[in-house]
Image: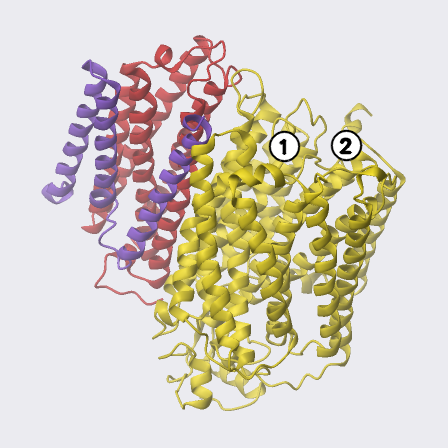
Amino acid sequence: MNIDHSKPLEYSTETNDLNIIGFWVFIGAEIALFATLFAAYFILEGRVADGPSAGHLFVISTLMIQTFVLLTSSFTIGLAVNAMRVGRKGATIGFLIITLILGLGFVGVEIYEFYEYVHEGLTLQTSAFSAALFTLLGTHGAHVSFGLFWGIAIIIQLAKRGFTPRTANKTFIFSLYWHFLDVVWIFIFSFVYLKGMM
Amino acid sequence: MRELFPAKQVVGFIASLVLTVIALLVYFIDMSFQLGMIILLLTAFTQAGLQLVVFMHAGESPDSDSIYVNTYYGIFIALAIVFGSLLAMVWGY
Amino acid sequence: MEFFKQFAVPNPTPTIYLSMVAIGLTLIAVLAGITYFKKWGYLWREWLTTVDHKRIGIMYLISALLMLFRGGVDALMMRAQTSRPGNELLSAAEYNEIFTTHGVVMIFFMAMAFITALMNFAVPLQIGARDVAYPRLNALSFWLYFMGAMLFNISFVIGGSPSSGWTSYFPLAGNQLSEHVGTNYYMIALQIAGLGTLITGINFIVTIFKMRAKGMTLMKMPLFTWSALITNLLIVFAFPVLTVALAMGTMDRLFGTHFFTIDNGGMAMLWANFFWVWGHPEVYILVLPAFGIYSEVISTFSKRNLYGYTSMVVAIVVISTLAFLVWVHHFFTMGQGAFVNSIFSITTMAIAIPTGIKIFNWLFTMWKGKIQFTVPMLYSIGFIPIFTIGGVTGVMLGIASADYQYHNTMFLVAHFHLVIIPGVVFAMIAGMTYWWPKMFGFMLNERIGRWAFWNIAIGTCLAFFPMFIAGLDGQARRMYTYSEVAGFGVWNLLSFFGGLGLAMGFILIVYNVYYSARYASRDIGDDPWDARTLEWATRTPVPEYNFAVEPEVNTREPFWDSKYEGEKLFKEKITDIHMPNNSGQPFIMSSFFFVLGFGLVFSLWLLVYIAAAGIAVLLFYRSFEKDDGRHIHEEDVRETEREMGGDTR
C-alpha cells in the first residue's frame, strides 16, 4: 500500500481516493432518490382524502428542535473530521459520539412526531398525502438511523485501530453521508414543513 | 482548544443557524405565498451550498472538478424530475 | 395445507405442471452432475467467489443468453397465438402473463445483463486497468442481478406470473385488479436487480474516471468506454427513480397505502410518470453501449479511424441530457394538455439530431474504408437501415397530435422492436462475436455466424414490418386474439414466420458456440481481428492481472499505433502486482436478498426478518474486515508471460 504523506490521511492511498469519489457518485444517486420522493410529495400534497392536511398537522416547536439538533450534529461531525486532521484521536471520537447522540435525539423527536400524527388521525393508509409524507420523512429518518449503526461501527474501529488510512477514510466518508442528510433535511424543513405551515 | 474549533467551521455553523432563522420568518411573519417561496428557495439553496463547500470539503479533493460536475448534474436531474413531474401531473391540465 | 395454498399458480395448465417437473428434474440433474464430477470446490473457488471482472462478465453473458431464450420462447408463444384469428392456443390470462414476462425478462434480465457483461469484460481492458474500482462490489452487483432474475423466473411455477404488462401500470397492477402475487414478484425482483445495477453504475463511473492508463485523457478514450461512462451516469441518476416507484408500488400492494390507488386521493397516473422518468433514460442506457460497440466494430473492420470522434462524444453527452427531458412522450394520451405535450414533443424530436450525427459518422467511417464483411461488421451494417426505420417511426410517434392515432397499437410495438433489436440485440451479438476470442481463446465460426445473421436480420424485418400495417389498420397491442373480419390475420401470420426466422438465427448462434468450441483453432494469437484498442494488446486468454505492465498511451488508437507507427505501449519493468482477494460474501448476501424478496412476495414476515438480520450481520462483518488483497510476485508474472509466448519485459 503506497501512502502519500503529503495529503490528509483520508486521501492518502489510491483506494481511499477511489472510495471518496465513489461515495460522491453515490450521493448523486441519493439526490435523484430524494428528488423523486419530493416530487411525489408535492404532487400528492393536496390529496388528503378525509384525513388531516399539512397545515393542520405540523407543529413549529418540534420542527425547530429537530432542525437545531441536526444542524448542530452536522457541525460536530465537521469538527470530528477537523480533529482527525490535527491528529487528536480522543477529540475525534468525542465529537463523533456527540454527533450520534444528537442523531439519536433527532430520530427520537421524529418518532414522537409520527406518534402524534397517528393520534391526529393520520396513518400511513389514510390518504395519498399521508403515504407521501411518511415515505419522505421515513426515508430520511431511516437514513439517519442507519447512520447511527454505521457511526458506532466506525467509533469502535477508531478506538481499536487508531488513525490509519482506512479508518480515516471511513470517518471522512461517514461525515459526507451525515452532511448530506443535513442538506436533505434543510429541504424537508423548507418545502415540506414551512411551506405547509405558511 | 483553538485547533479543535477552526474559525471556518464555527462561522459556517453560525451562518447556517442565521439562514434557518431567516427561513423561519416565513412562518412568524405574515407574507404572500410567492415572497415566502422565494425566501425559502434562497435560504435552502444557500444552506445546501454552505454544507457542500464548508463541511463536505468538496473543493479540496484532487477530483473536485468531477465532484462538482457530478453534483451539478444531480441538481439538474433533481430539478427536471420535480418540475417536470409537477408540470405533467399538476400544472399542465 | 392452508399455508401451501398461497404458493399455487392461479391459472394452472398442463404446460405449467410440465414446466414444474422439468425445472425440478433439471435442478436435480445439475446438482447431481456437479456432485458426481466433484465440481463444487471448483465452482465455489473459481466462479461463485470470484471478483475478477472478466469472469463476472462471462457470468453475466451466460445469464443474459439464458434469459434471451426464456424471453424468446415467450415471444414465439405470443406470435403463435396471434398467427391466425380466433386462435385458442393460449387463454387471455396466459397471454397477459406471457407478454408481461417477455418484456420484463428481455429488458431487465437480458438486455441489461448483456450490456453489463460486455462492459465488465471490455472496459477495464480498454483503459489498461487491472480490474474495476471496487471488485467486491462488482461481484455483489452480479449476484444481486442474478438473484433478482431467479426470483422473477420462479414466479410462473410458484404463485403465478405478473400479468399487467412490463410497464405494470396502476390501477391494473393494484391489489383490486391483480389479486395474486405476480405483481409482488415484479416489484421486488426488479428492486433487487436494480440495486445491483445501481452499484454497477457507481463502480464503472469511478473505474473510468480514475483508473485509465497513463496518458489516456478523456478525449483519448475508446468510444465504447465513452459510451459506458455515459450509460453508467444515466444508471446512477435514473435507477433511484425506479427504486422509489417500485417501493411505492410495493407499499400499495403490501401495506395498503394510497399512492397509485383510485380512492383516498391516490393518483394512478403518477406511477406512469415515475416509471417513464426512469424508463426513457433506460432506453439510452441500453442503446448507448450498443453505439459504442458499433463504433469499435465499424472502425476496426473498415481499417480506418472513426470519423468525427469529437462529434460522437458530443452526441452521446447531448443524448444523456435530453434523455431525461422526454419521458412524457410515453403517455401523450393521458390527458396532460396541449402545452405539456408540445414541450415534450419538441424535446423528443431534438434527440433525432445527435442520433443522426452518429449514423452519418458511421457511414463516413466506412466511406473509402477497406471493409471486411466479418460477422460483427454484418450486424453493424444491418443495424443502420433497420434502426433508421425504427427511429423515424419514433419521430412519427413523437408528434403528440398524431400519437393519438398510433398510441398502444401494433405500430408502436413495431417501432420499439425495430429500435431495440438492431440497436441492442444486433450490437450485443456483434460485441459478443468481436470479443469472443479475447474471452475464450477461440473464434466463432464465420460461416455459421453469417447464416445466423441473415436469419436474424430477415426475421426481424419479416416479424415487425407487417405490424406497422396492422397497427395503422387499428390492431391494438396486448390483445390475445382478434376476429377474422378485422383483416389482421395475414399480417400476423407473416409476423409469426418472422419470429420463426429469429428463433432459427438464435439456434444457429448456440450451434455456432458448440461447433466452434469443438473445432475452432486455438492458435489465434492475441489480435485476431487486427484491431485498434488496448484490449487486444494483452494476451489471449487474458491473464488474471490483465496487463503484466500497465500500458502508457499517447494517441486515441494506441494499439494500432504501436503496431504500425512504432509507438511503445509498455515502458516499465514487470513488478509485483496487487490483486483483490476472492470473497463468498457477495454470493451469500445476495442469497439473503433472494430469501428477503421471497418473504416479501408472500408476506412471510419471519423469513423477511431472518434475511434482513443476515444482511445486517454481513454488513457489520464487512465493516470490520481487514482485507488488503494479495500480491502476485514478479517471478510468477514472468513465468505466466513466458508460457503464453513472447517477450518478457
Chain appearing in red on the rendered image: A
**Quadrant position of residue C91:** top right
Chain appearing in purple on the rendered image: B
Q: Given the image, on which type of amino acid does mark 1 rest?
A: Leu
Colouring chosen for the image of the structure: by chain
Residue A188: x and y in percent read 33, 27
What residue did someone put label 1 on? C600
Q: Is residue C115 above or below residue A116?
A: below
Q: Chain of mark 1?
A: C
Q: Is residue C63 above or below residue C275?
A: below
Residue at image position (71%, 48%) is: C469
Label 1 element class? helix
Give the side of residue C381 with respect to residue C325, left or right: right
Q: Quadrant of the N terminus of chain C?
A: top right
Residue C440: x and y in percent read 65, 74
Label 2 element class? loop
Q: Given the image, on which type of amino acid does mark 2 rest?
A: Phe
In the foreground, C358 or C596: C358
Residue C367: x and y in percent read 51, 78
In the foreground, A76 or C259: C259
Q: Colour of chain C?
A: yellow
**Quadrant position of residue C405:** top right
Q: Quadrant of the C terminus of chain C?
A: bottom left
* Pointer 2 or 1: first along the chain: 2
Q: Chain of mark 2?
A: C
Residue at image position (52%, 45%) is: C398
